[in-house]
Each structure stands twice: as structure tokens, then as C-alpha cells.
Image (tube, coloured by chain):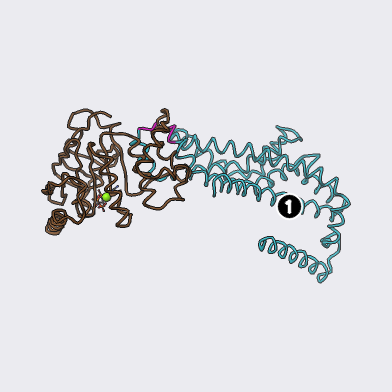
Chain colours: A cyan, B brown
Amino acid sequence: MTRALHAAAATLLAVLSWQALVTLADLPRFILPGPGLVAQALWSNRALIADHALITAIEVLVGLGLGSALGFVSAILLAASPLALSLLRPMLVFSQAIPVFALAPILTLWLGYGLWSKVAMALLIIYFPVTSAFFDALMRTAPGWLELARVMNAPPARVMWHIRVPAALPGFASGLRLAVVYAPIGAIIGEWVGASQGLGYLMLLANGRAKIDLMFAALIVLGILTLTLHAAVDALCRRLWGA
Amino acid sequence: MTPPPALHLSGQAKIGDTPIFGPLVMEAPAGQWTCLLGPSGVGKSTLLRLFAGLGDEVTFEGTFGAGDGAPLEGRVALMAQGDLLMPWLDVTANVTLGARLRGAEVARDRALGILDWVGLSDHAAKRPDELSGGQRQRVALARTLMEDRPVVLLDEPFSALDARSRARMQDLSAELLAGRTVLHVTHDVAEAARLGQVVLVMTGDGMSMAEPPCAQVPRTYDAPGTLAFQGALLRQLMEAQ
Ligand SMILES: Nc1ncnc2c1ncn2[C@@H]1O[C@H](COP(=O)(O)OP(=O)(O)OP(=O)(O)O)[C@@H](O)[C@H]1O
Ligand SMILES: [Mg+2]
């Protein structure tokens, strides 16, 4: 209850400061519209914004699902096989030296203007944090457990599945929590580079037509979308793994 | 369960170039409870880990193994100072961990029977974090019994318990592990005096044997014979360099 109250108070404070900034600095509405105008734009364009938000949400969710599944499997492979680790780790690290944003035009070229180039962006941007958070956790299994398993004559694959993976799930959860904040970035970049749908596309469109209030409305919806996803993933992780 | 073998070791252990223990000779008779006492850092855990097949980092010059000459692998159960319970598994699943790790059939009924012996039937569905330290160590004992191995290695398994729970765990373990070859590393002279059918004292000079009272184990903690033996063990430890 107090948490909800705090959140409400913080939102109110933010809106008030926003309005104060607009009023005091006497900003024109095509630079920064006040909260009232943005709320108006949000309401009068609700159907339009909802359609585009749904597209972005789907891109983010599919990217998140695929990226975390891929990260989950890769981390296990890397942790299970020293050969895979020595072959793939340098590649993974090098891939991090390329800004994912730089790949957006290429992905659009390869995958087209539809859903999949955005999914691929979201996937690429979350793959590394998920993989490395889970991998690190997999490599930190308590030595006592591994020794117990050895004395019990457990084959490595079963030790992985029954001990290392469950023990590392909190690490996977922290990777997911990062991913859920990164994934929308990927989707939006993808939409900027080439799309006909989605909140990123809508923002560009609104910008081009000098509908700054609509642009801010889309931005706020994007923020709410990300926060909601984060809360959902957080609740899910807590529920599943208590971490 | 196959008949319990004796354990023997003769030689010296190093990690890298650092000598850890020995040269020394050690013998733990078949089917008996052997306590191993010694000052901290003398190499007791290292010795135990060798028998458990865990001493990868240890270079051992000499011989060690089972008296019957067959490999020890698959005949050893280990109970360490920490209970090593998996927090994501309930008590029953923790007790049956070994079978699941080997991909063998899980004998649930047997597990419930063993939980009954250790007095935890009412807790079978609880998670480890819902148990007290003493209860958790009883789950670890149940898991060890579930493995049903002829050789049981104990590395200070009761040292984190309060005096009362510790005395109870000693009674319970002595009853339930009777007939197996037990090698029990402990810091506690009172524990060695209660449980040891053979008591070995390990010091920098090597291994020496102490003469325990003839009373059955677990010996009564306040019997004059037990107390006198406890005193003698402490003296032997104090007088070692
Ligand atoms: N991995 C290692 N590398 C180097 N030295 C080690 C390593 N493990 C243990 N030692 C050293 O080996 C010696 C014996 O360790 P060990 O754990 O066997 O002693 P212990 O008799 O069981 O002591 P305690 O009673 O405190 O448990 C110690 O001096 C320790 O510092
Ligand atoms: Mg030790």
C-alpha cells in the first residue's frame, strides 16, 4: 500500500516538475508540450497509439522469449563444454565490440521491414547480458555440491541439470531483468531504421509532422510498456525462483 | 550393501610443492567407527577427501584404498560440515538426490522410512530453509543413509550444532551407521570419546592410536570411562607438537 502511495507521489512530482519547467522556462509547445497537452494527445489518439504499442509489445516479447531461450541454452553449452567455451567466448566478446545499433540497417536488409528485423534487434541486444549472467552463475556452483555429486557418481550432464542449472537460476533471473529493459531499445531502433508500424515508427511519423505532443504520448506509452514488462518479469522470477 | 571394507593409507600428501601431511600410516578397520582427531590444518580433511576420490589437487605418494583391494568408487558416502542441502528441493527430494543424479529409480518409500528413523516424517515436504540446523543435519544424515554405501566418511558433520542436538545426532548416527566402515574427522575430543571404536590422533609427527574404553558406542557422555578417555585424548593432543 505504501509502495503504491510512493509511486503515485513520485508520478505526481514528476508531472508537476514537468509542468513547472514548461511554464517557468516558457517553452513553446513544439519544443516541449506540457503534460496536459500530451494527455490530450494520448486520449484523442488512443486507438492509434494502442495499435502501434501492440506491435512494439509483440516485437519485444518475441525477441525477449527467443533471446532468453537462446541465452539459456548457450550458457549451459558454454558451461558444460570447455571446448565450446574456448571456441565461442572470444567470438562473443568480439561481438560486443560491435554496437548492435550498427547492425540495424543490415538486419532490415536481410529480414525486411516487418516483425522479424525488430525481433532480431531485440534478441541481439539481450542475448549477451542473459548469456553472461547465467553463464557466470553456472560457473559459480558451490564446490561442496559438486563434490557431493561426484561422490554420488553423478554423470556431468545430470549434475548440470539437477544442481548447476537450478542453483544458477537466480543468475538467469538477473539477466532477464536486464533483458526486459534492453529489449524495447532494440525494437525501437529497429523501427526507426525501417518500419511501417510500432511506437518507434509512430514517434518518427509524429516528429515529421511536428506533432510533438503525439511523440511524447508515444514515448510515455513506451515507458509504461517497459515498466509493466519489468514488473511482470520481476514477479515471475520471484514466484518461480524466489530471487 | 556389499560387506564394508577396511581403509588403509600409507604415504605422504602434497599440494603443489607444499607438504600437507605425512609420511604416515593409517588403518581404519572394517565395519568399525574410527574417529580421526588432530589440530587444525594437519591434513585431516585432505586425507578424507583422498578416500572420497576428491583429492584432484593433491599429489599423494604412497598407497591408499580399501582393504579388499577393490576400488572405493561407488562404495563411499560423504557427509561434510555443511549439510549441503539443495534449497530448491524439499526434504524428500534432497534425501533421494543420489538416485536422481544417477538417473536411477527413486525409492520414495525407502526415503520416507529413513526420514522416519531420523524423526523427520512430519517434515518430508518442507524446504530446507524451514528447518532448524539440527533438523537439516538430520536430513543430510538421511541422504547419507539413503546412499547405502559400506564406507561412510564424515568431516566434522556435527560441529555447527548446539551441544544437545549434537549429542542426539551422535546417538542417531551411531545407531544407524553401525556395521559400516566409518571414518569420522572431528575436532571434538568428547565426540571422539563417545563414538570412536578406534580413535586416531593425527599430528605433524604422524598417526598415533589412542586406547578407547571397552564400553559400547555410543558411550554415555558422563560415564567416568568416557570422561577419562576424553581427558586422555585432550592431553595427547596438547602434548603433540
Ligand atoms: N588447495 C589447497 N592448496 C594449498 N594448500 C591447501 C589446499 N587445501 C588445503 N591446503 C592446506 O593443507 C593443509 C591441510 O588442510 P586440511 O583442510 O586437510 O586440514 P584439516 O586438518 O582438515 O584442518 P581443519 O581441522 O581446520 O579442518 C592446511 O595447512 C591447508 O592450508
Ligand atoms: Mg578439515
Can residue A111 be seen by looking at this rendering? yes
The image shows residue B97 at horizontal and vertical percentages of 41, 36
The image shows residue B2 at horizontal and vertical percentages of 25, 28
Farthest residue in the bottom direction? Answer: A24
- Residue for badge 1: A224
Residue B158 is inside the magenta segment: no
Q: Residues within 10 Å of mark 1 (few under 14, many from 20)?
A: few
| Front residue of this view, candidates B224 and A23 | B224
> The residue tagged with tag 1: helix, strand or loop?
helix
Q: Quadrant of residue A15?
A: bottom right
Q: Residue at x 15, y 50 (%)?
A: B201
Position of B1 relative to A60 (above/below): above
Q: Is residue B71 left or right of residue B114?
A: left
Look at the image and give the residue range highlighted in magenta: A153-159
Amino acid carrying label 1: it is Ile
Q: Is residue A154 left or right of residue A117?
A: left
The image shows residue A68 at horizontal and vertical percentages of 60, 39
Position of B202 relative to A92 (above/below): below
The image shows residue A203 at horizontal and vertical percentages of 80, 49
> Which chain hosts label 1?
A
Residue A158 is inside the magenta segment: yes
Position of B27 relative to A221 (above/below): above
Can residue B241 be seen by looking at this rendering? no
Q: Quadrant of the C terminus of chain B?
A: bottom left
Q: Quadrant of the N terminus of chain B?
A: top left
Q: Residue at x 22, y 36 (%)?
A: B179
